[in-house]
Amino acid sequence: MTTTVQPAATTAPAPGPIVVGWFEPGSDAWHAARAQGIGGSEIAAVLGLSPYESRFSLWHRKQGLIAPVEESEEMYWGKEHEPAICRRFAKEHPEWAIQGSATYTTADRRWQIANPDRLLYRLADDPDSAQPVELLEAKTSRDAEGWGEEGTDQIPVHYRAQCLWYMDVLQVTRCWVAVLIAGSEYREYVVEYDEAEARFMREAGAEFMASLAAGDRPAIDGHSATYQTVRELPDGLDDVDVEIETALRDRFHAAQDAAWAAEDELTACKGLLLDAIDTGRRATCEQQRIATRTVRNGKTYQLLPARTRRNAR
């Protein structure tokens, strides 16, 4: 399926948000409403900033060539914890009237989709007639990696893109981010609207929508979601040889050699770290955790790095 939605002007925010409908996140209707547009959790993929989705995989998903993203355990528990996180925010901020949110778009960019977790109104406002003043996003995180000092805007970059996307559609200037870290630590952050960043995202979104209409597939990159998409695309198996270009063969062999060398170096570093830790639990440097040693039956079981591919991007 090739979408026919055409990008509109991107130089300025569109006048007034438009309600697309009220949908249960993850439902068929929710997916359908987002199918021919770019949602807040998708703009990071368009920009190459998402740890979960690549521009390549999103393009194929929008074309209907691969299935919608299946709900992961992380997504499931994030959805389950969302109401509790929002209740805690309400307790901390009695100055706000907090309401659920519809799915929104804009008048001249119907492909720009916003579905914030909560809308914030002044206590004296009537939510049925007034526009929201600010927004609230509720997040969960396994650890504090990527989250800076509380009260700042130091949040993972893909969440920042989501907040700015929503603010641009709803035409508000502030989005709160309430996060539950490791199941027990509650923090709040604040993202302010930035017109230059929003304009950049609108332009990137319009270019992506144009590539969908033109059938112009993005280049294959190193994102795991891209590789998974390439794996899903072929259907069947033909027992034939396919000749490839010499340059691709050489690049593949060079990557293999580099990977094997990196694996050897990583194994050596793990040995040095464990030797330095000795009977300790954690390796730290300049007050930052580098790795954690786990023990089973008195012996080292594994060494868990604090820095993962997701938070190293």
Image (tube, rainbow, N blue to C red):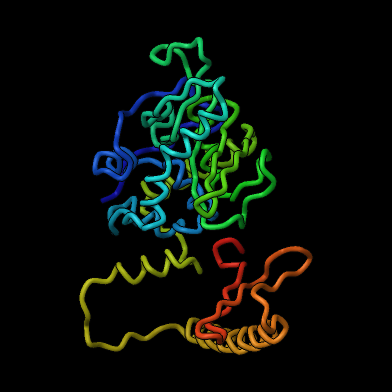
Task: Classify residue 225 as left or right of residue 168.
Answer: left
| Residue 195 appears anywhere in the view | no
Identify the residue shown where x is 50% and y is 10%: 124
Identify the residue shown where x is 44% and y is 23%: 17
Question: Which residue is nearer to you in this view: 83 or 118?
Answer: 83
**In the rendered view of the protein, which quadrant contains the C terminus?**
bottom right
Question: Which residue is nearer to you in this view: 304 or 127?
Answer: 304
Question: Which residue is nearer to you in this view: 143 or 207?
Answer: 143
Question: Which residue is nearer to you in this view: 189 or 116?
Answer: 189
Identify the residue shown where x is 25% and y is 39%: 29
Identify the residue shown where x is 49% and y is 49%: 140
Image position, residue 103 (x, y; %): 37, 31
Task: Classify residue 127 as left or right of residue 146.
Answer: left
Q: Quadrant of residue 230?
A: bottom left
Task: Classify residue 242 as left or right of residue 56.
Answer: left
Q: Is residue 65 above or below residue 86?
A: below
Find the residue positioned furthest to the front.
Answer: 298
Image position, residue 260 (x, y; %): 56, 88
Q: Is residue 77 above or below residue 93?
A: below
| Residue 52 appears anywhere in the view | yes
Image position, residue 164 (x, y; %): 56, 37
**Tally of marks:** 0
Task: Classify residue 210 as left or right of residue 204.
Answer: left
Image position, residue 55 (x, y; %): 46, 56
